[in-house]
Amino acid sequence: MRLTLRQLEHFCAVARTGSISAAAAQLRVSRTSVTEALDTLERISGTVLCHRSKAEGVVLTASGEDFFIRARSVLDQALDLEVPDGDRQLGGTLAVGCFRSLAPTVLPALWSEFAARHPGVTVSVTTGNRAELVEQLSLGILDVVLAYNLHALPGLGSARLYDTTMYALLPADHRFAERGRAPLAELAAEPLLLMDVSPSSDDILSYFAHHGAAPNVRMKSPDFELIRSLVARGLGYSIFIQRPRHDVSYEGLPVACVPLDPEPHLERASIAWSERRRLPAPGRSFVDLAIALGPQVAPAP
């Protein structure tokens, strides 16, 4: 007995959705067809690929997670065979992950340009913290991930979009806004509205600790725009890496982006993919586009 691409497609749909019913609905086939595909693949591979229960749905075993990665690679290569070299009319799907605070300033330009060039590709987007996104990338749930300092992580291939650094976000009338520099020793006593998304929060707190300062944390939130709006209202300051092109909050109130003193180390915004599987044609095209548009989506100097 030999496995088929259809069986692999059914298995990958179950792995992505975590449910036989959801996979059947996505593929527009019967639940019986999906179940038979799982049973057949387990017989062929001689191992249990997943645990099935009504309460928890379908959970991949360790063998199943490895099989999922290899199955995705086989399906990606099969899809590539359907696209002649030089043919720009790509099809299929592309799953993109993006660090939460990076997404509003990077994804709109990349997605719209990619959609204009490759209208036949169905794009899905997931936002989250870096650890979550990298895990989904390693499992084959995501094709590419946009985040900071991905080049430092093992098992990933990556390409640089741009380099930037942390800065202080202050109310427009703050005294340091007029000085054009925010000394950490003085800033530490003021209320900090901390961007609570890993690894941003760790980087910020490490910056304080490295220079022997202790921040006065007033609030923690994963919401980038909420913090910007609170800073604009004079309720504290924050430290960010990502900087929108316009220094105003959602309410239209001005904020000031001021360099920190001492100057923090550089942070690299990059796009990454798993080295454990061959990146499909839509993913390769998206990477090329991201590199080309890197200077356009980079923060203002």
Image: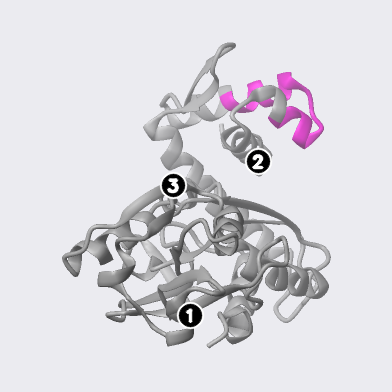
Magenta span: chief secondary structure? helix
Q: Nearer the viewer, residue 166 or 238?
A: 238
Q: Residue 93: which quarter of the image? A: bottom right
For label 1, count other residues whose C-alpha is less than 10 Å away and answer few (under 14), some (14-19) or many (20+): some
Q: Read off the residue under disc 3.
A: 219
Q: Is residue 100 visible?
A: no
| Residue bearing mark 1 | 177
Residue at figure coordinates x 66%, y 65% from the top left: 249
Report the Cα–Cα distance between label 3 and label 2: 46 Å
Residue 21 position within the rendered picture, expressed as x and y whole percent measured from the top left:
71, 23
CA separation in Å, label 1 and label 3: 22 Å
Q: Position of residue 39 (x, y in %)?
A: 57, 22
Residue 252 in the image, given as x and y percentages of width and height:
72, 67
**Label 3's element?**
strand
Marker disc for residue 23:
none
Q: Is residue 138 above or below residue 248?
A: above
Q: How many labels sit on residues? A: 3
Q: Quick one: which residue is furthest to the left in this view? A: 212
Q: Amino acid at mark 1?
A: Ala
Please check the rendered image and state whether residue 27 is part of the magenta-colored stretch, yes or no. Answer: yes
Looking at the rendered structure, the secondary structure element under dot 1 is helix
Which of the numbered marks, if any, corresponds to residue 9? 2
Residue type at numbered disc 2: Glu
Nearer the observer: mark 3 or 2; the answer is 3
Task: Indicate the amino acid at tag 3.
Answer: Met
Left or right of 298 in this view: 275: left
Labels 1 & 3 near each other (Cβ < 8 A): no
In the displayed structure, 114 sits above or below 27; it is: below
185 magenta-colored = no
